[in-house]
Image (cartoon, helix red, strand yellow):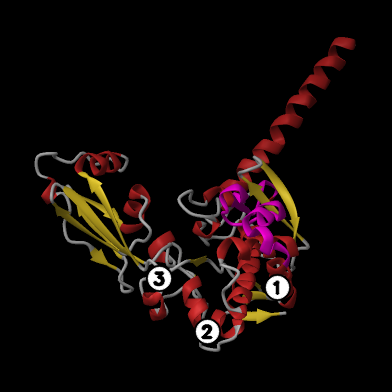
Amino acid sequence: MKKTFFLLCALLLVLGTLLPAAGYRLTLAALGPAPGAASTSQTDESTREAAPGSTAMLPSDQDSESFLLADQSAGAVVSVSRRDYLIGAVAAEMPISWPDEALKAQAIAAHSYALYCRDHAVDPASGWLTVDPARRQGYLTDAVLRSYWGTAYEENYARLSTLVDSVLTDVLYYGNAPAGTSYFAISNGMTETSENVWGSALPYLVAVDSSTDLNADNYLYTVQFTTDQLQQALAGLGITPDPSTPGSWFGEAALTPSGYVASVPICGQSITGPALRKALGLRSACFTVQYQAGGFVITTKGYGHGVGLSQWGAKALAEQGQSAEEILAHYFPGTELRR
């Protein structure tokens, strides 16, 4: 009798272990992973490189009082208040000296994007976004802000917190859910559509004019590679160039309608512009490649993936007198600002 009892307990223990795992795998099979999850954010820039995409769970029309962040500095998931997150996110993304309306637009975009990531994360408990305060990426803690601003901390914090408080509950919606309001530093003069970068089309992440970006600091940026350096980088893409003919490695690039590199032939293989940008650590997927004097010269226009809000564009529009709401309506057409 005792033997039967222990066998039954063992069986129940095994089933209790296997059934949740099976249910989890079934859920993933039915819904699939979401490109908007924190685990998919690229490592070459901050969290704004994470891609809005498919839905992993039903989007919510509810705001959150606290935000879950995967803090790479701490190696842990941390919960921060909505207000603290928005202050830290804006400080990480824009200089405090920029116009009020640009800073407010950035706060609303960061707020909306975080909620979008919450709604599209495969496992929200693992963090909606990946941040690295120690490297000043995505979000800055109060301790980092004190070090960063130094003696100007009190003045800067007072100004930024007042601006954040004025838009604390503002969220951009598309339909009945927060929009995936991605952002980046500088465009090439036009923003890019989401499908050309992340493969998923969203109706509000389309190409819009951002020609004021041409006046941004370091809009044009040139880097040089030796033949050996470029050969090593291309090896990461599975390409083995002929070292005796470096001048013929690159063919003519195909461009998207916004002027970013869609693809470029390299030693007989077609590589997408975003893939080559990542492999070479380029500032932008709008680039030209020249072979000269035994090396390669690559010139980029803009900085970032190019999808959504151009931060330098927001600065320029704010300086022209546009409000945060008008700036966001320009970069995210078809969205609605709810307070």
| Residue 156 seen in render | yes
Could you say which disc has been placed on residue 198 in the image? none
Quarter where residue 197 is shown: bottom left
Find the distance from the CA under tag 2 to the CA under tag 3: 18 Å
Range drawn in magenta: 125-154
259 left or right of 9? Answer: left
Quarter where residue 240 is shown: top left
**Disc nearer the start of the sequence (2/3):** 3
Q: Amino acid at mark 2?
A: Glu
**Mark in front: 3 vs 1:** 1
Query: Residue shown at 13%/50% (left/top)?
Result: 293
Could you say which disc has been placed on residue 187 in the image? 3
Could you say which disc has been placed on residue 319 in the image? 2
Predominant SS of the magenta segment: helix
Between residue 65 and residue 336, name the one nearer to us: 65
Q: Residues at badges 3 and 1 in contact (C-beta under 8 Å)?
A: no
Could you say which disc has been placed on residue 159 in the image? 1
Dot 1 crowding, Cα within 10 Å, few <14, some 14–19, many 20+: few
Q: Amino acid at mark 1?
A: Arg
Find the distance from the CA under tag 2 to the CA under tag 1: 18 Å
Dot 3 crowding, Cα within 10 Å, few <14, some 14–19, many 20+: many
Kind of element beneath mark 2: helix
**Residue 128 belongs to the span the image colors magenta:** yes
Between residue 282 and residue 173, name the one nearer to us: 282
Q: Amino acid at mark 3?
A: Ser
Q: Position of residue 326 (x, y in %)?
A: 57, 85
Find the distance from the CA under tag 3 to the CA under tag 1: 28 Å
**Disc nearer the start of the sequence (2/1):** 1
Kind of element beneath mark 1: helix
Query: Residue shown at 69%/45% (left/top)?
Result: 77
Between residue 126 and residue 12, name the one nearer to us: 126
Q: Position of residue 176 (x, y in %)?
A: 66, 74
